[in-house]
Amino acid sequence: MAEMFADAVTLVLLREARETVSGSPLGVINTPMIPWCQTTLPLDIHCNLHIKLENMQRTGSFKIRGVANQFARRPRGGHFVTMSAGNYGKSFAYASKHYGSKGKVVMPETAPVSRSILIQSFGVEVERVPTSCLMNVVNRCVQEDGMTFLHSYDDLDLIAGHASLGMEVLEVMPDPDVVVVCCGGGGLLAGVAAAIKLSGCDKTRIYGVEPDGACTMHRSFIEKKPVCMDTKSIASGLAPPFAGTLPFELCQRYVEGIVLINDEEITAAVSTLYRSGLVVEPSGCAAFAAIVNGKIPELEGKNVVCILSGGNIGKEELVNFPG
């Protein structure tokens, strides 16, 4: 089934989604992509590195791209349920309010309470449960309450919407050598990779980055099928309990490899970015952490893109990171 859907991800589909996203009433932004040399960030690698500032996106993360495409292709006034640690839930709630839809977000208990409060402020219900129970609660909402499930990463419309980020990258750097993207369930990585490879950049190397305590896609690559595991990471947005089936199929086709970073490297990356004036959440700085810690091979002299995927981190959370 997933392979069939993977075949449906064509350049025509992605271009249509790009039009939908850029014209969305949700106000999706074509975020800046700037040369590393225009920042005060340290780097020991001699390469032409650009950072895509998706932490400046509407609702604070890339998630609004996929949500814009999902909601545009579903009836107004629906009753939707989803599961999210925060960023997808925030975009989902923002869209629900705009489209006049009823919504519910099932959140892992490990997600910051501040994110639950924010999502509820858009008029969307939140239910916090243990991570292992997320899908059970979603299924209950579908079966007992007649809600429609919108998946936060394993959804064709969502992935096509996320691909708009990859197309924006190519408008600034038409033939990148390396693109580095965070990976949780794999929706963003799959969309960006498909957009770049289907646009003719066959030689571009694309890497996903996962926390070592939540390495579902890395394990899926090894076992050659989507796997489920108990996940734990400071980057809660990169720690869903399973890799998406469609993202896995697309990543197998278009991604060179998945590299792992640890929570200490993520914590240090948040602090380094903050000192340079960039507010980036732990999940959003995974690609940056992988690059500065030498996890991506053969960058010397290359044109490289690093995606900073989200900036939703509160003052009360930043206190926990070293200055």
Image: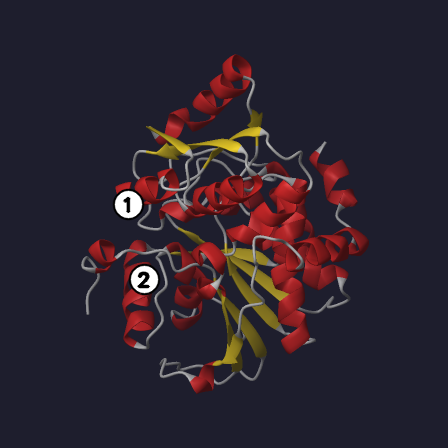
Image quadrant holding the C terminus, namely bottom left
* Label 2 or label 1, whichever comes before in sequence order: 1
Q: Residue type at mark 2?
A: Glu
Number of marks in the image?
2
Q: Residue furthest right?
A: 12
Residue marked by disc 2: 265
Q: In 3D space, how far apart are the residues under numbered discs 2 and 1 (Cα atoms)?
A: 24 Å
Residue at horizontal 27%, vertical 59%? 264
Q: Nearer the viewer, residue 80 or 265?
A: 80
Q: Nearer the viewer, residue 9 or 68?
A: 68
Mark 2 vs mark 1: in front: 1
Few, some or many residues within 10 Å of mark 2 (<14, 14–19, 20+)? some
Residue at horizontal 27%, vertical 41%? 113
Q: Position of residue 1 (x, y in %)?
A: 72, 31
* Residue 268 versus residue 8 in the image, above or below: below
Q: Residue type at mark 1?
A: Ser
Few, some or many residues within 10 Å of mark 1 (<14, 14–19, 20+)? some
Residue at horizontal 36%, vertical 84%? 40
Residue marked by disc 1: 114
Question: For the residue labelled by badge 2, is the local secondary structure a helix, a strand or a loop?
Answer: helix
